[in-house]
Amino acid sequence: ESRAAEGPRPRSQVGSEAEGASEARRKACFALVPEPLSPSSPNSRNEGKQLFWSSFHTDKVQNTVWDAIHSEGARIDTAELEALFADEPTDSRTRPPSPELSKKIKKVQVFDNQRRRQVCVMLARLPEHAMTHQAVFNMDDRVLNKDQVELLLLNVPSADEVAQLRTAEKSIAADENSQWETAEEFIFGLINIPEYPLRLQAWDFENSFVERYTSISKKEQDLAAGCACLLESPGIRRLLSLILFAGNFLNGGTPRGRADGFAIDALVQVRTVKSTLNQGPGSSTSLVDYLVNQMARQHPNELDGIVDPNGDAERVKTAARHSLSDVTEDFRSFRRTLDQVLTRVTAAAESSESSEAFKRHAEVLAERVTTLDELGERFDSLKASYDKLFAWFQVDACGSKKTPEEFFGIWDKFLRDVCEARAAQRENERQEALGAGGGPQQLRAAPSAKTTGGAGALLRAGGQCPQPLRMSTLPIGIEWTSPLAQHEVERWPSRCDVAAL
């Protein structure tokens, strides 16, 4: 009312009053704020972190949040603010930092980055550090499985790493703010376990014993079965007899005929001897086909015993996969490792500082010795079987020595040819049974000069031959040819197998 009675005021007076109100508002706000860091210069530069914002100022009272904030005021602890966000340590007037902020932990590293990364990858697959160390001390299968023990054995520290850890141990003991890095901490705890390398080695050997023993034993059984097959199989002996008699017939009248035996090398060449008859596109009869045909007629059961699953051919093939020398050396190495580990574990079990784990494992390893002794006797019998096998086939009679691997390899290749020929023969029989094709086609040879040798005499005496064969090279390296006259080829053979040649 009094202002209205006075009448209107000049514009300059109104502006002065607005500025006075704004200044009063600022003073009311700062009155609630504690003493600034520099009282003589409230707007001095603060040596600390800054909050970069876009600010503004108002010259008159408005109904905004900022006016409400300035009216209410606020108090802040500038000493703590400077201590937390100062670029440099504050002076004595600031609040001292907490002990947790001032304490700096120094991580001690010994390994290079690659080695540390390798250990950390291992730790990701293991239980907690203390639990793992205790399991190694007790050799406890309930805590660590086979793969984890093998992983620990692969990461056992070297002598240089152990020396570096022992040296770094002194610096950690002298500085309370020093701590091991994670990888170094675990390995340091591992090397403090008494006889830790022996514990891991013995533990890993026992874990892998059954698997390794089974592998070696299976290979020995395969080799022994292959030897027994070649020594005792009636089908193998029948097949060899056909090759020998066919070769002697084809070599009749030459210095290489009437042989008592032949080198085993010739078996892989039997398939290369092809018939000279033209039997149509894509067809070719080899000496292997002839032998299988003769076996099927005279000894079908024995032929099936060779080619059927789990037959002689399969046993020889399995034996050919292994090397006798390699398997024998693997067994000897296995036995040497057992003896070394048992000696060291027994000595550790007898020491005064031994744990029950060494005593327990020493008893288990002693039982393993008996198991390997029995396997060693089987290897001695296998060696005797090889000697008997080589004498049975007179492998060294032709002056060409063969290793056991080469010997079984030759037999494997030959018997595979026999199996393929028998499979083709069975397929032809199946097609004929289904009516898909006719019987064997009679092929006539072109007229030639008169027949020489025993074949002509046999044919004139009533021998029967399905088709004349012109043999080029015999598997044993003998060259022989015998043209047969067309009028001598009439009917399929019944008993005269030599005439079929």
Image (cartoon, helix red, strand yellow):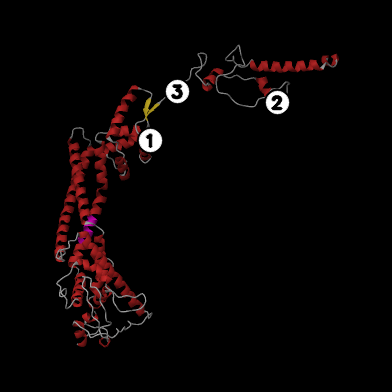
Q: Does 309 appear above or below 206?
A: below
Disc 1 element: helix
> Residue 122 location in percent, x, y?
35, 40
> Residue 323 location in percent, x, y?
23, 56
Quarter occupied by the C terminus? bottom left
Q: Earlier in the sequence, mark 3 or mark 1?
A: 3
Magenta-colored stretch includes residue 220 = yes
* Residue type, numbered disc 1: Asn
Q: How many residues crowd mark 2 within 10 Å: few (<14), some (14–19), many (20+)?
A: few
> Residue 230 location in percent, x, y?
19, 66
| Cα gap from disc 3 to disc 1, whole angstroms | 29 Å
Say which of marks 3 and 1 sits in front.
1
* Residue type, numbered disc 3: Glu
Q: Earlier in the sequence, mark 1 or mark 2?
A: 2
- Residue 417's disc number: none
* Residue type, numbered disc 2: Thr
Using the rendered image of the protein, determine whether residue 99 is visible from the camera's viewpoint.
Answer: yes
Q: How many residues crowd mark 3 within 10 Å: few (<14), some (14–19), many (20+)?
A: few
Disc 2 element: loop
Nearer to us in this view, 79 or 230:
230
Q: Quadrant of residue 168?
A: top left
Q: Tell me, yes or no, whether the two marked residues, 3 and 2, touch with CB atoms within 8 Å.
A: no
Instruction: Give the residue number, with chain letter if any, for mark 2.
Output: 64
Q: Give, as a single range, the part of the protein colored magenta.
A: 217-225
Instruction: Give the residue number, with chain letter if any, for mark 1.
Output: 113
Give left or right: position of 48 versus 198.
Answer: right
Instruction: Give the residue number, with chain letter if any, for mark 3.
Output: 100
